[in-house]
Image (cartoon, grey):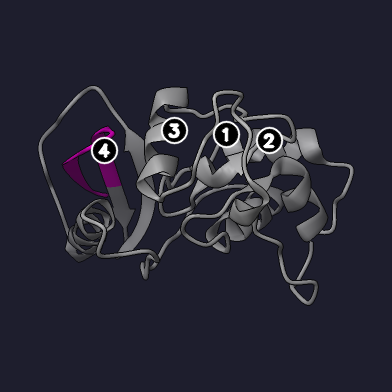
Amino acid sequence: MSVRFLHSPVGALRLSAQEGKLREIALTDKAGKDEPDSATDLAASQLLEYFSGKRKEFTLETSPQGTPFQRAVWQALSEIPFGKVVTYGDIARAIGRPTACRAVANAVGENPLLIVFPCHRVVAANGLGGFTGGIAVKCALLRHEQVEISEKSTFSEKFFFTFPTNRDTI
């Protein structure tokens, strides 16, 4: 397994890859020894472009480890465009499991590829919702994408994304 540590505006990130595919991007408070490969180098480069405002989409080979349900949720995350938000319920409907909002929230919380699978773009029906890295990091990422957050943590309709109706479901 290859590992690379990256300092970012939201904190230190640990990037891990195996067999040339990205497996993890996680916030960390412990820096370790870099043992990068082409996958972690490419991910670091694209993340730096994202934080500098030059990149809105990622083109990385990934191999997240999870259940079929989790992978369906993570695939849906990857479809949310830069500067847009969806609710947990939107994702549940998009993957064909409209009553699975709580399970979707759990899968979002288990997202192994922060930022690349943009879980920060998922909000609760009545506000911000949670975030593994903390609400301050979630808000920083949303503001980086020019998503306006009101004092009541609500969002203007112009920031909501609607999943296409012709997408595959589980």
Q: Which residue is rendered at x = 60% and y = 43% of the image?
A: 122
Residue matched to label 2? 105
Q: Main SS of the magenta segment?
A: strand
Report the magenta residues as a range.
1-15
Residue 90: where, in percent of width, then height?
75, 51
Residue 158: where, in percent of width, then height?
62, 55
Image disc number at residue 109: 1
Kind of residue indicated by mark 1: Gly
Where residue 166 sits, quadrant-wise, is bottom right
Residue 59: where, in percent of width, then height?
37, 70
Q: Which residue is rendered at x = 71% and y = 64% of the image?
A: 163
Residue matched to label 4? 13
Q: Which residue is rendered at x = 49% and y = 50% of the image?
A: 118
Residue matched to label 3? 139
Kind of residue indicated by mark 3: Cys
Question: Upstream in the sequence, badge 3 or badge 4?
Answer: 4
Distance (Cα) linking label 2 and label 1: 6 Å
20 w.r.t. 139: above or below: below
Distance (Cα) linking label 3 and label 2: 18 Å
